[in-house]
Amino acid sequence: MTVIQLMNRPEWLWQYHRAIPSLLRAGGPVLDEILRQLQVHGWGEQDIFAVHLSLEEALVNAIKHGNRSDPHKTVTIRCSLSARKFLVEIADQGQGFDPNAIPDPTDPEHIESPTGRGLMLMRTFMTKVEFNAKGNAVRMEKEKSPSEERTDKPAET
Amino acid sequence: MRRQPLTQFESIAVRKKGDVAIVELMHPRAVDPADVALLRKELSALVEDGRAAKLIINLHRVQFLPSAVINVLVVMEKKARQQGGGIRLCRLRPEIEEVLKITGLDKWFKLDVDEELALAAWGRQGS
C-alpha cells in the first residue's frame, strides 16, 4: 500500500502536512503541534515520549545529514493520527543513505561512532520504521501501547 | 588559552568536591545544534585542560536525551578515562535510563542513583 493510499483511509482523526526549510528550529513548531494532537487524542506519556524522541531523531537526520542544512532544500512531514495508530513520513531532498549499512552502535567496536544511535532509538521506540529505496524518506508507525489504552470502553463478553 | 571560570558556564553548573567535579546539565531538552555545540565546548573546557578527570554528571533536569547529546557524553567519557578518571551519571529518569540501555551505554557509563552514591563510588576507586 502506498503512503497516499494509507493517508486516504477513513479512520484518521487528524492529518497534517508541512514542508519546512532545512533549519532545525523550523522543526520545533511542527513537533509541538504533533505532540499536542497526540495529547488531545488521549495518547499516554510513554507513547508520546517514544514519538517525540523518534521525530527529533528523524528530523535531525533529514535536515543535517539528508539536506546537509542547505536552506534551499526542504523537509516534508506528513502524518496521520487515528485512535490507535500514528503514522508519519519525513522526506528530505538529499542523496539518501542505506540504513542497512549503518553499523550496530551497541557493538563495542562502534560504540564511539556518532552514527547509528538515533536510528536504533527510532526502531526501538516505534512499532515500524521503513525507508524508501533511495533512503531519503522514512515512514514510521506507532501503535498505541495496550498499557496506555483507556479503561472506560465496554468490556467484551 | 585563558581558562573559563567554573561559574561562567551556561549549559552546565559545576561544583568540585575534592578531585571530583559534579556537573549538572542545565538544559532539559538540548535538541538544537547550538545547544549541543555549547555543551560539547563547555564539557571539553572542563575535561581537556585537566581540571577534572573524575566527573559525576547529574541528569535530574534532563527530560530528553537525543543521540547528539549522547554522542557528546561518550566522547567526554573517553577523554576523562584517558586522564585517569571517567564519567558517572546519576539521577536519571526511567526513560533516559531506557535510552542508555537500548544503545548499550548503561555499561559504557557507570550509573548511580544519586550524587552521594556516585561520590562514594569514586571514593572506593581511589585516585
Image (cartoon, coloured by chain):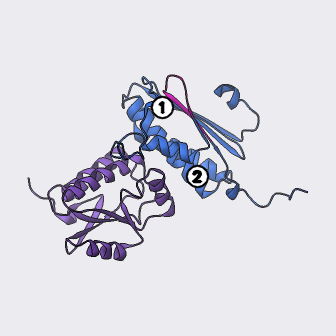
Chain colours: A blue, B purple
Q: Which residues are magenta?
A: A130-141
Q: Position of residue A58 (x, y in %)?
A: 48, 39
Is disc 2 in the same subunit as disc 1? yes
Percent coordinates x, y for residue A40 in the rendering? 66, 52
Q: Is residue A52 left or right of residue B31?
A: right
The residue at the point 71 percent across, 46 percent down is A84
Q: In the displayed structure, does residue A55 sit left or right of residue A65?
A: right
Q: Secondary structure at mark 1?
A: helix
Q: Kindly identify the residue that appears in the image at 50 percent across and 63 percent down.
A: B94
Which residue position holds label 1?
Answer: A100
Q: Residue B116 location, x and y as percent?
A: 35, 77
Q: Amino acid at mark 2?
A: Ile
Residue type at the position of mark 1: Asn
Q: Is residue B82 left or right of residue B1?
A: right
The chain holding disc 2 is: A
User: Quadrant location of the C terminus of chain A?
Assistant: bottom right
**Which comes before the other along the chain, label 2 or label 1?**
2
* Residue labelled with disc 2: A48
Q: Residue at x 68, y 31 (%)?
A: A7
Give the Cα distance between marks 2 and 1. 27 Å
Q: Which mark is residue A140?
A: none
Quadrant where the image shows the N terminus of chain A: top right
**In this view, the mark in front (2 or 1):** 1
